[in-house]
Image (cartoon, helix red, strand yellow):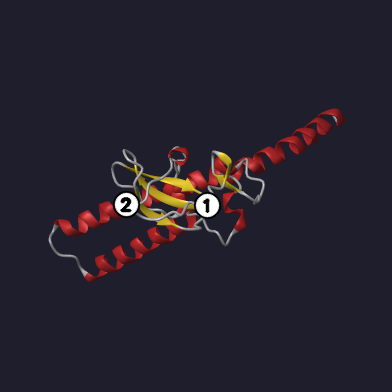
Amino acid sequence: MKHMLYAAVAIAAVSAPIAASAQPGHERREDRRELREDRREYREDRRDARRDGVITRDEARELRRDRAEIREGRRELRYDRRQAETWRNRAEWREYRGARNGYWYAPGYGYRPVARGYSWRRGAYVPTSYRRFYVQDPYYYGLRAPPRGYRWVYADGNFVLMALATGLIAEVLLDRY
């Protein structure tokens, strides 16, 4: 009986850190799923309210409250620079070991040397060496979806919206991550 008790304690001691480390990513997936469901339900409610051509005061109040909850949920899922721990459980930040002089970190791609003498501005072109550093999840960083034919890329700690065909910079967000 003692041996079984020791075995159970040993298994619990080994599996607890594994379960704890897996939990934040699982919670984040669940939160995203719930947000998608909430948005779907909101669209259905809005469609139902408009179906008869008249939206009552109660329906309008309910729709406003639902829309506010969805915005709050979306805000909670986004990256927040003020909360240092929000990036820790994301796969693309796994190799990050802190700031390094002369280097910038491209999440998912690792450390890269800073391009000297290059200024990121609208109308310029992204150097070919930077065009492969795509932002995997723009919504996480609070970026809007790129238009067709464009991609967000990481560039020296900035976000740059570039045209895929030419590399032309359409928008620059400086020091955003």
Furthest-bottom residue in this view: 57
Q: Nearer the viewer, mark 2 or mark 1?
A: 1
Disc 2 is placed on an element classified as helix
Task: Look at label 1 and name its amino acid.
Answer: Gly
Check the image and report above or below for 54 versus 124. below
Q: Which mark is residue 41?
A: 2
The quarter of the rendered structure image containing the N terminus is: top right
User: Residue drawn at (81%, 29%), measured in percent from left and top?
Assistant: 4
Measured as percent of width and height from the top left, residue 78 is found at 48, 54
User: Residue drawn at (57%, 62%), measured in percent from left and top?
Assistant: 82
Question: Dot 1 corresponds to which residue?
Answer: 157
Please rate how many residues cluster around mark 1, counting C-alpha atoms within 10 Å: few if below 14, some from 14 to 19, many from 20: some
Using residue 36 as the reference point, say whether residue 3 is left or right of it.
right
**How many numbered markers are drawn?**
2
Check the image and report above or below for 79 versus 149. below
Please rate how many residues cluster around mark 2, counting C-alpha atoms within 10 Å: few if below 14, some from 14 to 19, many from 20: few
Asked which quadrant contains residue 19, the reply is top right
User: Residue drawn at (43%, 57%), measured in percent from left and top?
Assistant: 173
Q: Which mark is residue 91?
A: none
Q: Earlier in the sequence, mark 2 or mark 1?
A: 2
Q: Nearer the viewer, residue 150 or 61?
A: 150
Furthest-front residue in this view: 117
Task: Look at label 2 and name its amino acid.
Answer: Glu
Q: Nearer the viewer, residue 4 or 138?
A: 138
